[in-house]
Image: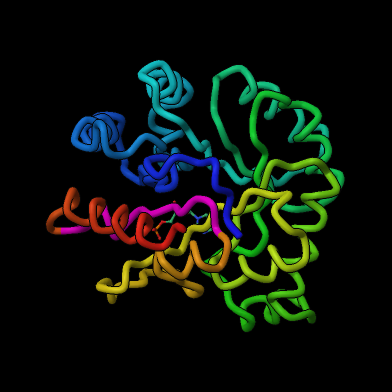
Amino acid sequence: MYRKDIPLEERLILALDVPSVDEARSWVRSLDGIVRFYKVGLQLFLAGHFSFVDELVESGKKVFLDLKLFDIPNTVAKAMEQINLHGVTFTTVHAESAILKAAVEAAPKVGILAVTVLTSMDQEDLKAIGAGASLEDIVIARASLAARAGCFGVVASGKEAHAIRRTLGDSLVIVTPGVRPASSSDRGDQKRVVTPEEAVKNGADYIVVGRPVLRARDPLGMVEKIMEELKQSLD
Ligand SMILES: O=c1ccn([C@@H]2O[C@H](COP(=O)(O)O)[C@@H](O)[C@H]2O)c(=O)[nH]1
């Protein structure tokens, strides 16, 4: 079951996957009063650095800084100390026990999310890198590491959200990318996709959406449609 204490307007996290700060600002302006939570990923962070993150935070937006850190624990801890200074709500680290523990300890003001298995990967991709276990078992193993390390939550596909809830209850927040509204036929590079409704029904607390909005003919209409679908899916 998803968490009930999150306002509807914060459950949709818009991925600002755009090349410039100007373009990002224009999206935020056009969605003022509708979307409150924005994801800054590698592309935009490399364009706007922390000054754009600070600008979003100072304007009252919530920020998910999605850098998916993966390095030795000491290096991750030093990076997390920097992130901890900027008022971001969530940031991401790949799920390995010592790395997660180092991140949690170094950034007490940030909700650390462990990346389980990228939504662009399927069982075949895992096999190709030598992972023999089932995709679901790997997601559960990594989510369990996240819980033990004291993470705030995980990034997981809606396909595995239910299994995470079944195994770990509601101790972790689940943030779900790879979301495609039922009307959208373009998955792009995503292999494990769910609709907003499926994400919520399976136990996701937040959904992350990028291209379905950024590339929509009517982006505002698309956001409203997703919000409505979320609203209808919540009890
Ligand atoms: O497993 C993951 C982890 C992160 N992402 C990020 O979410 C958005 C999804 O964008 P769409 O355009 O809606 O596909 C993107 O920024 C990814 O970096 C993910 O997709 N899967």
At horizontal 74% and vertical 35% (from top left) the residue drawn is: 76
Is 176 placed above or below 138 here?
above
Looking at the picture, how far across and down is residue 78, in whole percent? 74, 26
Looking at the picture, how far across and down is residue 18, in whole percent? 31, 43
Quick one: 39 or 231, which is closer to the camera?
231
At horizontal 79% and vertical 79% (from top left) the residue drawn is: 133
Residue 142 colored magenta?
no
Q: Is residue 8 left or right of residue 122?
A: left
Q: Quadrant of residue 88?
A: top right
Q: Quadrant of residue 185?
A: bottom left
Q: Is residue 16 left or right of residue 109?
A: left
Quick one: 97 or 4, which is closer to the camera?
4
Residue 72 makes an appearance in the image: no
Number of numbered discs on residues: 0
Q: How is the image coloured?
A: rainbow
Looking at the picture, how far across and down is residue 49, in whole percent? 46, 26
Is 51 placed above or below 177 here?
above
Identity of the residue furthest to the left in this view? 217
Q: Is residue 49 left or right of residue 108?
A: left
Q: Quadrant of the N terminus?
A: bottom right
Q: Which stretch appears magenta?
A: 204-216
Q: Is residue 76 left or right of residue 29?
A: right
Is 160 placed above or below 128 here?
above
At horizontal 42% and vertical 64% (from top left) the residue drawn is: 179
Is 95 placed above or below 162 here?
above
Looking at the picture, how far across and down is residue 141, in whole percent? 80, 64
Residue 187 makes an appearance in the image: yes
Identity of the residue furthest to the front in this view? 235
At horizontal 77% and vertical 34% (from top left) the residue drawn is: 104
